Amino acid sequence: MPSKSEIDLLSLAELHWHKMGQASLSGSLLELFRKLDARFQDFAKKYKPEEYFFPPFISASQMAKLDYFKSFPHLLTIPVTLDEEKDNLLEFAGAPLREDGSLQLGKVQAVKEVLTPAACYHFYDELEGSKFTSCKFFTTRCVCYRREKQYLPLQRQWAFSMREFVCIGSLEEVQNYLAEFEAALAVYFKEMEFPVNFEFATDPFFNPSANPKYLLQKLEPVKKEMIYDGKLSIGSLNFHRNFFGETFSLSHNDTPAYSACVAFGLERWIYMILNERGLDSNKWRI
Amino acid sequence: MKSEAEFRSELRKWIVNKNGKIKAEDLKDDTAIIEQRIISSLQLMDLILELEKLSEEALDVEQLKPGVFKNIDSICHNFYKGESNA
């Protein structure tokens, strides 16, 4: 039995839900998407973050440096291309689809990229080897891809939009950044009367009991989620220590840089607005 | 049973050796060993084994609370059981 909000969401003409876990938006919902993204950027305007546009693929070898494949193999989405051999292409073109709708791929080329599962990874890849002498702020919005067992419109999607704000600097600068961001968000949630609490969380590790990184996150929490209505994470504040600094040779005044990011899930925010403000777009105060 | 000073000293020596870069004099009792990544996630597992050795007691990982490995002070507070009267 679907929940009330699901029924309402699926009745919206401006939301087209694709059951493979993706949503198309148009009209007032697309406008809400853009206004929310502008609101997030407003939260961070005092830092004047430098904005980047990133492509959807990220190098597998860079992701391997993060132990991503060991920690989150279940979330991965991998772009695949066909082997260029003429007979292979002819065979595929002759019978591309099986009866169940899946592609009959035949021989495929070596895979060296993955679809990005989070927006901020691109920065560490892009900025690898940088030597900073002052605290730096960056932002981007990406479509991110995370394979899940099941999907729900706007709440749990295979492909979803994430706006991130990254800070790279000293330990103190990065910790102050997170504290300031959290304080500003807490004021905002209160003013808007959105029932959102900050809660420590761990990332969804594969086989967590066998992964020391999970234990470390549990014992020294570095991730705080913005939990809407006690159940849905609409964003998070993440302290990376100097992990990315060491892994990607990012330095701040000649020592491995510390970093942090604040992430907002656009579709989940839309879900919250619809739930809190109703379906009349005139009442979507954000 | 070790004295607290011996416990601290052996713990400090272990962390310095494991890290390989930090000097013993720079590792204070309140130096944040996880936050500053003096101890990595992999080394944390070894630290748990080392603490079992030092405290002569098996640790139940599931029962460990956030913050117990923050620094040498918090480790002593949580894992040093005091000198035995036996």
Image: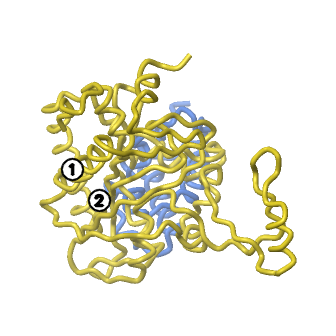
Mark 2, Cα crowd under 10 Å, few <14 / some 14-19 / many 20+, is: many
In this picture, residue A111 sits left or right of residue A264: right
Is residue A113 something that shows in the picture? yes
Q: In this orientation, which residue lies closer to the viewer: A59 or A130?
A: A59
Q: How crowded is mark 1: few (under 14 residues within 10 Å), some or many (20 or more)?
A: some
Q: Which color was chain B given?
A: blue
Identity of the amino acid at label 1?
Answer: Phe
The quadrant in which residue B37 appears is: bottom left
Instruction: Point out residue A215 in the picture as x, y percentages from the top left corner.
Output: 54, 46
Looking at the picture, how far across and down is residue A254, in whole percent?
31, 82
Where residue B66 sits, quadrant-wise, is top left
Whether B22 is drawn above or below A277: the answer is below
Output the chain of dot 1. Answer: A
Residue appearing at x 45%, y 46% in the figure: A24
Residue at 69%, 71% (x, y): give it. Answer: A111
Q: Are marks 1 and 2 in contact (CB under 8 Å)?
A: yes
Q: In this view, does B34 lie to the left or right of A114?
A: left
Q: Name the residue under label 2.
A: A165
Name the residue rendered at 41%, 83% in the picture.
A129
Residue B67 appears at what percent x and percent y? 39, 43
Callout 1 secondary element:
helix
Q: Colour of chain A?
A: yellow
From the image, which quarter does the N terminus of chain A lie in?
A: top right
Q: Which quarter of the picture shows residue B60?
A: top right
Q: Nearer the viewer, residue A135 or A18?
A: A18
Q: Which mark is residue A181?
A: 1
Rounded to the nearest angstrom, the CA distance separating label 1 from label 2 is 10 Å
